[in-house]
Image (cartoon, coloured by chain):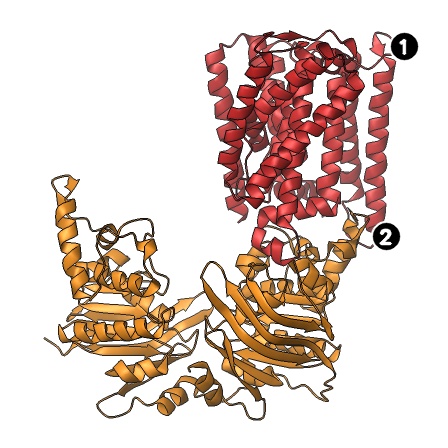
Chain colours: A red, B orange
């Protein structure tokens, strides 16, 4: 196979995955041209990624929930409520930020387990169980903020999560050194893992990509990481939000693709009866997925509260639907068993890019909703079409 | 007008690669009860689906002549309009609706644009009287027993002015009283001029009620027996039902080495909470090392339920009795416990609960034994490819690559993947439920050969099968089940198709 036919073949095989990246690239290109490059400015990209953070972490959890054929509507107000609880811990109770954050995350996981219990053990449809949760946490949020209204958080350490950046150490030509180092480490790690995977495959005597295409892939992806690093380093460097988001993606990506637990999740999603007969404990998997969803909702609440530097009475409104939309744009299938964590993040970035780009262009909010809805529908239509073609 | 209300002439129906019906002719006289008999997979249901328009005109060859006219049914509504009513084994009622709503569902009595409920109730009462059912029309269907629900299905058919009523195993789920009732009703309807086709496995019923009986085998009409000529007799029916010699598709196992008992059931019962009855009754069974035992019986006789109750009880039956594996008494809480005890169960429904159809071959093969390709919970994906390749080659799975999606493989290859998945768990006891259902003869032979190889490697196999030829060709011993109970145990030297059928139709 020569270089071009191999590349074409690869593209055809993975059209759904690559399609998403191509769509993101097209969206970014269009906005960049329309805004005379303003869209791809360091400052805008940095803001865009930060504003995507609290939805992106929810979308990761939501993807797994949808993969096992359920849904979680409670996460928006759960995030809002737990964000407010965190604010109360920090301001009214004087708890240190290093205790607040783990405690809030554990709260989230426990609440998620309750959802899992209602769904797996009691047998309540996820839609109903989590709808009840949504109402309850909305009420709970109002209750805890009733006396004070918006709670202003003054803890600098906490606020840095949503607004701060990693220290720069040294500035070279206006570029932040530590961010450059982080980017470089990322690239080296990526190249190392690609080479070691390839070496392993060769050791087993399996087929691998031709060396030309392999090098092209490495160069392209390294270039993208380098470009993003350079962009961010030119503003304030990597924000803590981006670092947290990357951490969540790396952990969940590893978990879903490289562990037994991940495999069990997809097995339960693609055929629960067969999974049960294969010795997989379907209930346990459901607990785990909802528990992780709850924990990520807590994380989302922390990111949002810290970004606003305050807990508001309406925090979390419609987060769950934004997360669901991001997950679907990212290629999850409601029939179960299909969907990637990386897709969820790209989905969230696509949606955030649309908002950001349209804001720069001064598109009215009414059109923004319509266009975002259209993109969601288009993504799902593309999904259905490509799947039908292959099926 | 001709004597025959229905003539089906030279019907041939092909599915991709498989002839389900070949040149079948079937005639029903006005006002007779005609039974349609055959083994599972003989083509009875397909024939009735052709008749009722489930398979529309043009998808089969041959003619359907109903009431003297060649009919071209395109959908079920067409055959209903012509006066053919069909009642499937799985009842199609709405349990949450009332009896009168059910009877007229899809056929509502209207006054202007609105439903005339008063008229509906009046008509429903008349129909209930006609089928001898003494319940109020306002009762919810879910509150009635299966026997009464069956009668409501018949009332529903009568509401559409049916001339020919088709019943697919109507008594399969009924107790004796209800069955008796139903058969009486059919006789009564016959006296009112309604003809009836009944598919049944219960030979006693056939003998008591049929005017004619047509026997199908392997998609062909074998013969039509006539009660007036005294032809409807048990031995004659069974002989024609099975009537073929075991072909040479069963590879012989040389030098059998049968060892110690590896699995034993003592007074084993399983109670299904949802159905509210015992699906396995007091079973006693044993399996020895290096042995294939066949479990024969008709569909619904409790064979799959028996297998599942052994294999970690995924359906949550209430179990009673004792299970011994390698002499040790066991209680499995989950399928994973059974797998740990080296038992594997290859399901009869590979698409429904066997395979992950949207996943590829290698992930299916590793799915039940991820421990075998992981270390501390982290997968070794290269090891997975290696394992997948091994089993793909060993079982001769025909596929382009290991990454092929299992849903796109042929039935035989899917079955091999399903088998591979379980062999990778390293079983000592392999339960095969209908191992060759829906796969072609070539693939069947391969599966049998694999079974023999496994036995030589020291495994023991429980094979559940509805194909008598397979049971006789492959087993060392045969258990026959009916209505959840083991009705008999036969050594292979004593087992014949007739002796098995006799036990299975008790």
**Residue A25 shows in this picture:** no
Q: Is residue A60 above or below residue A82?
A: below
Image-based side of B305 in relation to B42, left or right: right
Provide the chain ID for the residue under circle 1.
Answer: A
Residue at position x 72%, y 35% in the image: A252
Q: Position of residue B9 (x, y in %)?
A: 26, 75
Q: Is residue B176 above or below residue B149?
A: below
Residue denoted by label 2? A203
Residue at position x 33%, y 55% in the image: B143
Q: Is residue B152 above or below residue A117?
A: below
The answer to which of marks 1 and 2 sits earlier in the sequence is 1
Q: Position of residue B285 (x, y in %)?
A: 61, 79
Which of these two is toward me, B311 or B258?
Answer: B311
Q: Position of residue A191 (x, y in %)?
A: 83, 34
**Residue B224 shows in this picture:** yes
Q: Are marks 1 and 2 in contact (CB under 8 Å)?
A: no
Q: Nearer the viewer, mark 1 or mark 2?
A: 1
Q: CA distance from mark 1 to mark 2?
A: 43 Å
Image-based side of A300 in relation to B351, left or right: right
Dividing the picture into quadrants, the one containing residue B309 is bottom right
Q: Position of residue A152 (x, y in %)?
A: 67, 6
Q: Is residue B204 above or below residue B443?
A: below
Residue denoted by label 1? A170
Crowdedness near tag 2: few (<14), some (14–19) or many (≥20) residues, C-alpha within 10 Å:
few
Residue situated furthest left in the rendering: B1
Provide the chain ID for the residue under circle 2.
Answer: A
């Amino acid at each position: 196979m020569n270089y071009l036919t191999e590349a074409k073949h690869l593209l055809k095989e993975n059209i759904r995955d690559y399609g998403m990246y191509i769509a993101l690239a097209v969206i970014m290109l269009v906005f960049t041209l329309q805004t005379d490059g303003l869209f791809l400015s360091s400052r805008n990209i940095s803001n865009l990624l930060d504003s995507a953070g609290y939805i992106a972490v929810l979308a990761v959890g939501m993807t797994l929930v949808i993969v096992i054929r359920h849904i979680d509507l409670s996460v928006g107000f759960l995030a809002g409520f737990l964000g407010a609880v965190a604010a109360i811990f920090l301001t009214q109770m004087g708890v240190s930020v290093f205790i607040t954050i783990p405690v809030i995350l554990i709260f989230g996981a426990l609440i998620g387990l309750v959802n899992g219990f209602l769904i797996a053990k009691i047998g309540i449809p996820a839609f109903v169980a989590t709808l009840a949760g949504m109402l309850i946490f909305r009420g709970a949020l109002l209750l805890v903020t009733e006396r004070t209204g918006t709670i202003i958080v003054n803890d600098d350490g906490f606020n840095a999560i949503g607004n701060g950046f990693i220290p720069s150490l040294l500035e070279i030509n206006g570029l932040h050194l530590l961010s450059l180092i982080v980017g470089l480490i990322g690239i080296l790690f990526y190249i190392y893992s690609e080479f070691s995977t390839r070496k392993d495959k060769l050791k087993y005597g399996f087929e691998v990509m031709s060396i030309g295409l392999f090098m092209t892939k490495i160069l392209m992806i390294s270039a993208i990481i380098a470009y993003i690093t350079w962009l961010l380093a030119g503003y304030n460097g990597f924000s803590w939000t981006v670092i947290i988001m990357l951490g969540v993606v790396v952990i969940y990506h590893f978990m879903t693709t490289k562990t037994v637990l991940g495999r069990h999740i997809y097995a339960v999603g693609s055929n629960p009866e067969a999974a049960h007969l294969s010795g997989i404990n379907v209930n346990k998997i459901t607990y785990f997925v909802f528990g992780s969803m709850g924990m990520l909702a807590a994380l989302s609440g922390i990111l949002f509260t810290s970004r606003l530097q305050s807990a508001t009475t309406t925090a979390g409104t419609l987060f769950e639907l934004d997360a669901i939309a991001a997950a679907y744009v990212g290629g999850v299938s409601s029939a179960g068993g299909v969907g990637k964590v990386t897709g969820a993040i790209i989905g969230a970035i696509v949606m955030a890019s649309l908002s950001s780009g349209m804001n720069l262009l001064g598109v009215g909010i009414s059109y923004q909703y319509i266009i975002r809805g259209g993109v969601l529908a288009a993504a799902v239509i593309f999904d259905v079409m490509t799947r039908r073609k292959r099926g | 007008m001709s004597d025959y209300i229905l003539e089906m002439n030279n019907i041939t129906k092909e599915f991709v690669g498989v002839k389900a019906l070949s040149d079948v002719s079937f005639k029903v006289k006005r006002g007779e009860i005609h039974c349609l008999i055959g083994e599972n997979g003989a083509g009875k249901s397909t024939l009735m689906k052709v008749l009722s328009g489930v398979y529309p005109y043009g998808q089969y060859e041959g003619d359907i002549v109903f009431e003297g006219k060649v009919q071209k049914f395109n959908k079920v509504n067409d055959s209903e309009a012509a006066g053919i009513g069909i009642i499937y084994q799985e009842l199609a009622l709405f349990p949450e609706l009332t009896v009168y709503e059910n009877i007229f569902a899809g056929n509502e009595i209207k006054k202007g644009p609105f439903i005339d409920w008063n008229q509906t109730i009046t008509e429903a009462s008349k129909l209930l009287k006609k089928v001898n059912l003494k319940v109020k029309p306002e009762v919810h269907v879910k509150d009635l027993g299966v026997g009464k629900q069956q009668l409501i299905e018949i009332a529903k058919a009568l509401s559409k002015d049916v001339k020919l009523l088709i019943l697919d195993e109507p008594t399969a789920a009924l107790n004796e009283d209800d069955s008796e009732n139903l058969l009486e009703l059919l006789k009564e309807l016959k006296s009112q001029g309604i003809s009836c086709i009944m598919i049944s496995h219960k030979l006693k019923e056939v003998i008591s009620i049929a005017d004619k009986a047509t026997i199908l085998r392997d998609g062909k009409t074998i013969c039509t027996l006539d009660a007036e000529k005294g032809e409807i007799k048990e031995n004659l029916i069974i002989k024609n039902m099975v009537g073929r010699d075991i072909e040479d598709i069963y590879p012989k196992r040389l030098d059998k080495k049968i060892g110690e008992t590896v699995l034993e059931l003592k007074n084993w019962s399983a109670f299904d909470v949802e159905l509210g009855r015992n699906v396995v009754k007091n079973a006693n069974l044993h399996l020895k090392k290096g042995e294939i035992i066949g479990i024969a019986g008709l569909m619904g006789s409790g064979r799959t339920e028996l297998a599942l109750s052994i294999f970690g009880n995924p359906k949550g039956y209430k179990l009673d009795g004792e299970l011994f594996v390698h002499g040790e008494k066991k209680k499995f809480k989950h399928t994973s416990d059974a797998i740990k005890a080296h038992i594997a169960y290859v399901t009869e429904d590979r698409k429904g609960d066997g395979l992950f159809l949207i996943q590829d071959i290698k992930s299916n093969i590793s799915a039940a034994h991820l421990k075998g390709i992981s270390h501390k919970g982290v997968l070794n994906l290269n090891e997975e490819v290696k394992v997948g390749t091994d089993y793909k080659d060993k079982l001769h799975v025909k596929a382009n690559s290991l990454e092929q999606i299992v849903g796109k493989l042929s039935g035989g290859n899917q079955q091999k993947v399903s088998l591979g998945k379980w062999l990778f768990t390293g079983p000592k006891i392999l339960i095969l439920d209908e191992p060759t259902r829906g796969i072609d003869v070539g693939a069947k032979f391969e599966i049998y050969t694999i079974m023999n190889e496994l036995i030589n490697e020291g495994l023991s196999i429980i094979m559940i099968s509805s194909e008598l030829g397979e049971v006789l060709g492959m087993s060392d011993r045969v258990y026959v089940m009916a209505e959840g109970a083991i009705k008999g145990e036969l050594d292979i030297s004593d087992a014949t198709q007739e002796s098995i059928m006799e036990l299975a139709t008790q």
